[in-house]
Amino acid sequence: MKSRKPNNLHIRLYGDKTLREVAKPVTEFTDDVNNFIADLVFTMYEKDGVGLAAPQVGRSLRIFVVDPFWFNDDGKKNPLVLVNPEFKEFHGDVESEEGCLSVPNIFEPVQRAESVIIEALNEKGKKVRYEADGLFARALQHEFDHLDGILFIDKIPKLKRMFLKKKLHDLQRTTDQSGRNIGELPL
Ligand code: NI
């Protein structure tokens, strides 16, 4: 197989419409899909993310990648690819701070299930199943939400969201059609 250098993809920011779409299931592992998965993994590490979902780079497909152990495992990379994921079980309830590459500079506590069981296809189209807790469970839930057009800021209490309103509005206002931040508008 011909080797191909993966691309560092551009991250769509809050205000971009792909982030708000319900992504479509993958029906076939074409070369395009396989290359895209490689790019998504590459980009996650380039951007120092714990996870990255396809809609965050402008592809409305039900694919995300996570590596919740990268930071505490001597920088050893062990990316997990989840295609067409489905949660099977949720247990418990826990609150912890989250952020998102698509919503820069905002970190807020979000309520999530403490542990989950998820099934998906991996990059080879093989069925995989993970039982996760801690940061792994949180990352799975956060990335899965991206596939349904949901952002973590949708899940914080209304009052808190009101305080963030100006910050979010400014971010949205300075995000252009292709999800790029064009900086402060000269207004
Ligand atoms: Ni995110």
Image (cartoon, helix red, strand yellow):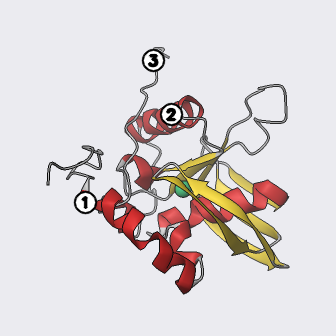
- Quadrant where the C terminus is found in the figure: bottom left
Mark 1 C-beta closer than 8 Å to ligand 1: no
Where's ligand 1: which quadrant? bottom right
- Res. 130 mark: none
Identified by mark 2, the residue type is Thr
Decide if residue 20 is on the left or right side of residue 79. left
| Residue beneath disc 3 | 5
Decide if residue 111 is on the left or right side of residue 55. right
Identified by mark 3, the residue type is Lys
Crowding near pointer 2: few (<14 within 10 Å), some, many (20+)?
Answer: many
Q: Residue at x 64, y 69 (%)?
A: 86
| Residue beneath disc 1 | 173
Decide if residue 183 is on the left or right side of residue 185. right
Q: Disc 3 versus disc 1: distance between alpha carbons? A: 34 Å
- Res. 43 mark: 2
* Mark toward the start of the polypeptide (3 vs 1): 3
Return the residue nearer the eye: 60 or 34.
Answer: 60
Whether residue 117 is visible? yes
Furthest residue to the front? 187
Furthest residue to the bottom? 158
Residue 171 in the image: x percent, y percent?
34, 57
* Mark toward the start of the polypeptide (1 vs 2): 2
Identified by mark 1, the residue type is Arg
Query: From the viewer's perspective, is residue 142 above or below residue 100?
Result: below
Q: Quadrant of residue 116?
A: bottom right
